[in-house]
Image (spheres, rainbow, N blue to C red):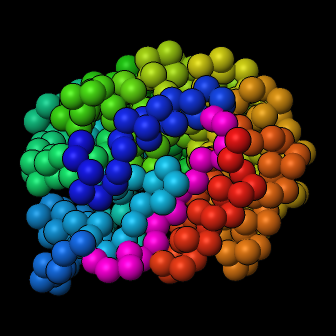
Amino acid sequence: MNERYRANWQKLYDEFEAWWQAKNPSPMLWATAKRKAPLAAAEAETPFADEKDFYVNTRELSLRYRNFCREHEFLGQAFPNFSLNLGAGSLALYLGSEPNFHWDTVWFSETVKNGWQGVPDFSFDEKNPWWQLHLDLYRQAVELAGDDYLVAIPDIVENIDIVAALRGPQDTCFDLMDEPEEIERRVRQIDGLYFQYYEPFFQMVRRPEGVSSYTAFNILGQGRVAKIQCDFAALMSPAQFRRFTQPSLAAQCAVLDHAIYHLDGPDAIRHVDALMEIDRLAGIQWTSGAGNPDGLDARWYEPIFDKVRGAGKNLLIYAMDGDLDQKMAGIDRLVERYGKSGFYVQFPDVLSYDEGQHLLEHADQYWKE
């Protein structure tokens, strides 16, 4: 990688490898800030034709991302990486769903409306038009990125989340009680297909030095990297999670070189114990959910952070509430309670140039070894 938008990539790779082992010597930080002056003049941007174009116009999306890189600095362990998703859970598209594009999200059509009887087994369909389109979009994206920034593996999603996308969440809940063996069988089919779809993207985006990045939560590492999840777990009991989801996650982690689990909202906290039982799972990304305090709040210490750090695993959290000084104070409290290793704190909002410098100065003074 060249250093047009980010300096010292090898140091960054080493820092991430330490974090995956929860052995980083100081908290990892993701922050972007306005540059004091742009690196180059922005290229003219063209409005998107419609909601679908907003997702599939690789050339325009790449141009806009390059403009962002010219105008913003990547601070701490932040790095330029370009995402190109057809919604979160595009594996459902490859298995026959159709997308409903919106400016802020993509919904997938339910294809299993009248029960599972007569529904063919899930299988790899090389000719699926959405699969072929997504591959073409990625070929373009990799070419346009060159050595300036990473292109991230898309958020194809896995396990019972894909079953629920195709069947619908309510009917999937009924099926867990009425047809548990069928749901278990379908989830195992998706387990078998996941890497058939993951691998071509990985091979396209992997850098010569062996590094890849994943679209969700700004993660990278040597080899195969992914965020894994089961948002449907909010509707599952701990026993159901251990039966239908935990084996899938463990199987994924056995193939991936680095994996972090997306824990989505308070209703998912009851599954932390089961997640800690997965040896090769590196850690938890905590999303506190709408209306709840952000990931720096002390109410998450006992039910989540104590267990995760006690298991020797790492945490990725968002700093979203309050001004910059309040966010930094929240990180101070984490360091005081847990020490400096194991954390990756992200600032989703773009900082001003002065705020970015203030954050770096505070980190150097209080969080560095």
Q: Position of residue 348 (x, y in %)?
A: 54, 67
Nearer the observer, 115 or 267: 267
Mark yes or no: residue 325 visible: yes
Q: Quadrant of residue 207?
A: top left
Q: Residue at x 39, y 66 (%)?
A: 73
Q: Which residues are magenta?
A: 24-38
> Whole-percent x and y of residue 323?
70, 79
x, y percentage for residue 124? Answer: 23, 27
**Would you say residue 98 is visible in this rendering?**
no
Q: Is residue 229 left or right of residue 67?
A: right
Query: Is residue 15 positioned above or below 64 on the image?
Result: above
The image shows residue 46 at horizontal and vertical percentages of: 13, 82
Task: Name the residue nearer the viewer: 220 or 157.
Answer: 220
Rendered view: 369 above or below 312: below
Q: Is residue 76 above or below residue 309?
A: below
Residue at image point 75% right, 55% down:
366
Q: Is residue 71 above or below residue 163?
A: below
Q: Quadrant location of the N terminus? A: top left
Residue at image coords 80%, 58%: 332
- 339 on left or right of 81: right
